[in-house]
């Protein structure tokens, strides 16, 4: 790999198969939402297909890396690629945060009295467009009557996720210093914290649905709440799976003090997920 050479991997079937699996997952999910359980088989096939493609694709990349096929230029390419991927994720969540801020900053005041003498006030004289948006009694879709406190389960999950970033940093520093036992133990703790976050969010969703009536159909509040926290939860699940794969590699003796970008990329992604959650906790739960 010296002399300015650049490794070009052979053509791969995984991108096409991954796209087909993702399409099956989306179609199956859509059919389930419209027609019920009839879409379950397609959704399961898509989900299994995505997991299989991830497994096999990661396997190929790991084998190439272990064979020493990647040089410094490839390392830079990986870093730029991961950086742009995280930037795209930032823009993804920025769109949802933008929708939340627009609704609360512009739409609600306009409905309540600042636009056309208060559109909602003209239709429903007793209506006040507060947040969460509580639809008038005769509206087609009712909003939640109350929201749960941010200082219980949401705060616990915040502490868990912030703590997981700390444990992951300790594991990373241990790997860079050649202390593999330290890296393995602290990475294991990070994975456990990620699993705890997922479990607690599941409990929180159940409470939101059963005790507070917060659903996707519960007005704009329910829609923005589940879109923001749901997509973030999906990212936590993916991040946890990635960390499990990295932990398996660490246990098998992969990575060195100087060559461990796979570990670094997983850490970048996890820290990004942590920062997004802090924004969610602040603007969805607290304010």
Image (cartoon, grey):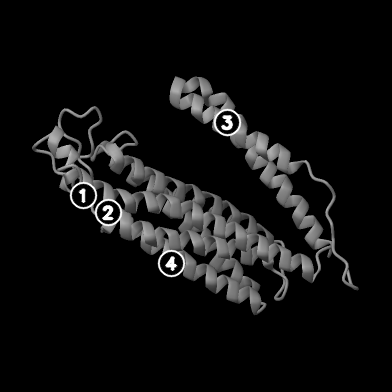
Image quadrant in which you'd find residue 135: top left
Residue nearest the viewer, comparing 209 with 83: 83
Residue 96 vertical position relative to residue 23 in the rendered view, above or below: below
| Picture quarter with the N terminus | bottom right
Image quadrant in which you'd find residue 160: bottom left
Under circle 4, the secondary element is: helix
The reply to whether dot 1 and dot 2 touch (C-beta < 8 Å) is yes
Residue 200 visible from this viewpoint? no
Pointer 3 residue: 44
Under circle 2, the secondary element is: helix
Pointer 4 residue: 163
Residue 93 visible from this viewpoint? yes
| Label 3 Cα crowd, 10 Å radius (few <14 / some 14-19 / many 20+) | some
| Label 4 Cα crowd, 10 Å radius (few <14 / some 14-19 / many 20+) | some
Pointer 1 residue: 109
Under circle 1, the secondary element is: helix
Q: Nearer the viewer, mark 1 or mark 3?
A: 1
Pointer 2 residue: 105
Q: Position of residue 285 (x, y in %)?
A: 29, 55
Residue 264 vertical position relative to residue 52 in the rendered view, above or below: below
Earlier residue among tags 4 and 1: 1
């Amino acid at each position: 790999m010296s002399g300015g050479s650049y490794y070009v991997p052979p053509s791969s079937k995984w991108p096409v198969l991954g796209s087909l699996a993702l399409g099956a997952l989306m179609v199956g999910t859509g059919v389930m939402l419209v027609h019920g359980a009839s879409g379950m088989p397609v959704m399961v096939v898509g989900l299994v297909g995505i997991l299989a493609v991830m497994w096999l694709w990661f396997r190929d990349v790991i084998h190439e890396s272990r064979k020493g096929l990647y040089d410094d230029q490839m390392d830079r390419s990986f870093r730029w690629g991961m950086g742009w991927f995280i930037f795209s994720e930032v823009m993804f969540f920025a769109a949802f945060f933008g929708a939340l801020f627009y609704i609360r900053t512009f739409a609600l005041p306009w409905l309540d009295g600042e636009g056309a003498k208060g559109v909602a006030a003209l239709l429903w004289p007793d209506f006040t467009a507060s947040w969460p948006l509580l639809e008038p009694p005769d509206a087609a879709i009712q909003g939640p009557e109350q929201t749960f406190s941010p200082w219980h389960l949401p705060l616990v999950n915040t502490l868990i996720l912030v703590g997981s970033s700390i444990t992951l940093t300790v594991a990373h520093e241990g790997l860079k210093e050649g202390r593999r036992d330290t890296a393995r133990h602290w990475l294991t703790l990070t994975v456990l914290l990620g699993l705890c976050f997922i479990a607690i969010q599941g409990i929180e969703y159940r409470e939101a649905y059963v005790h507070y009536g917060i659903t996707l159909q519960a007005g704009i509040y329910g829609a923005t709440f589940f879109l923001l926290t749901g997509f973030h939860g999906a990212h936590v699940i993916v991040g946890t799976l990635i960390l499990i794969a990295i932990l398996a590699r660490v246990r098998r003796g992969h990575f060195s003090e100087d060559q461990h970008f796979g570990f670094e990329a997983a850490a970048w992604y996890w820290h990004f997920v942590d920062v997004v959650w802090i924004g969610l906790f602040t603007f969805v739960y607290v304010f």
